[in-house]
Image (tube, grey):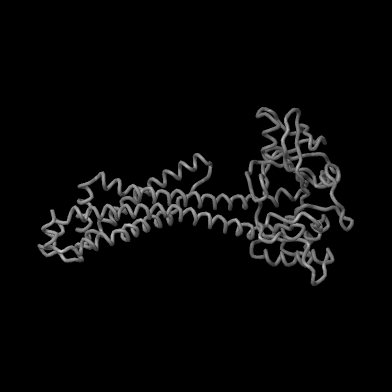
Amino acid sequence: MPLLESVRIALNALSVNKLRAALTMLGIIIGVGAVIALLSVGYGFEEYIAQQFAGLGSNLLFVFPGQLEPGTSPVRRMTQRVQPLTLGDAAAIADPFQVSDVVAVAAEFSRNGSVVRGNRELSTYIIGAPPQYQSVRNFTLTLGEFINQEHVNARSRVAVLGAQPAKKLFDDAEYPIGQTVKLNDVPFRVIGVLEEKGGGAFGNQDNIVIIPISTAQTRLFRAPVVRGELAVSLIFIQVVSQDVMDSVADQVTALLRERHRISFRDEDDFSIISQADLIKVFGDFTAVFTIVLGAIAGISLVVGGIGIMNIMLVSVTERTREIGIRKAVGARRRDILLQFLVEAVVLALIGGALGVVFGYGCSLLVAQLAGLNTIVRLEAILLATIFSAAVGLFFGIYPATRAARLNPIDALRYE
């Protein structure tokens, strides 16, 4: 029997019991819809993570004091008995005669604190930074100016507000530039406001206040002195391209080991992590997260397949006399087998197509409710469609085989 003729017969058979066919397809519709919706959430989360790391800057290496704890993410580090990094380390790394292929170096000295204006107060993250910090961290100003070298040299009490402190401390009609705020009860003059950036690998990038690094180290906080130099919390290194990341990391490692007088057999007292390393760690997590979501949704498809098998068995029983007549007029066993297999697959494919529409609608709803940019990819649609057809084929084999094996004489006698 031609395949197209089998499809036509299958559609006619399904149209006889429209309600039953619709209820049978419901399991497939929900299953495919769940696959599409959950995978779109997973893909959207992957894109969100990538955007957050891109917001940190481009082609970055991060130098942390101390060794990273085994089995933890790269953003966590040891906090006890750690040999601090210093401004001298940052200056040495920025020296092109000691480390090549470096675009810019920016150290930061940061602590948690509070920012107050009048009766408005906000707990925030206070970052002492040099002028290069803006370009290295890819910050954009909406108002005013950034920290400059004169501010650093003079240890000026000036501050650049993140988007969140600016909104909390000032009304929409107020102009924050030139106004005074207090950081840990010390007055500072606002010279700039940063563009909103969102969360990232280093926390909320909007709930920050940036001040000159010299002011943070000596006037607002008390930075440790190591080898006659003031300590810093972290050093950012921007390199010329991704291709030289490993080379620059090796050069920085050799330089810092020499500066810190680390003997040949001793471990480093610092850690160097690339932006690619951070993306890989979080990328592996989001990939597993997406696979788990897809697997959970796939269970719904299997349940839908069981529903198809159940209904097809009922259909074989109801159409036993029809099968006997077909065999009596010359239909072969494989013709009967193909007819019922095609019917099961058509049922699954129609349910799959409706499930794709349902899943796309669910992904849009999730995007609106959760504020996450969900992504429906073509491979997710193809995967769900192929899997639904495979489910229909697999769970249709037994009913189709049972129909094909019916004895035509017994089938004709069936009432």
At 89% from the left and 56% from the top, the residue drawn is 228
Q: Is residue 223 left or right of residue 112?
A: right
Q: Is residue 353 left or right of residue 412?
A: right
Question: Above or below — where is 203 with respect to 166?
Answer: below
Say which quarter of the image contains residue 65. bottom right
At 43% from the left and 57% from the top, the residue drawn is 379
In which quadrant of the rendered image does the N terminus lie? bottom left
| Place of residue 389 in the rendered image (x, y in percent of width and height, measured from the top left) | 33, 57
- For this rendering, which residue is in front, 339 or 201? 339
Q: Is residue 24 left or right of residue 163?
A: left
Q: Residue furthest right?
A: 228
Q: Is residue 405 left or right of residue 43?
A: left
Say which quarter of the image contains residue 411. bottom left
| Place of residue 21 in the rendered image (x, y in percent of width and height, measured from the top left) | 27, 48
At 19% from the left and 62% from the top, the residue drawn is 336
Q: Residue furthest bottom?
A: 264
- For this rendering, which residue is in front, 317 or 263? 317
| Place of residue 82 in the rendered image (x, y in percent of width and height, measured from the top left) | 80, 57
At 20% from the left and 47% from the top, the residue drawn is 16
Q: How many marks?
A: 0
- For this rendering, which residue is in front, 351 or 192? 351
| Place of residue 3 in the rendered image (x, y in percent of width and height, measured from the top left) | 22, 61
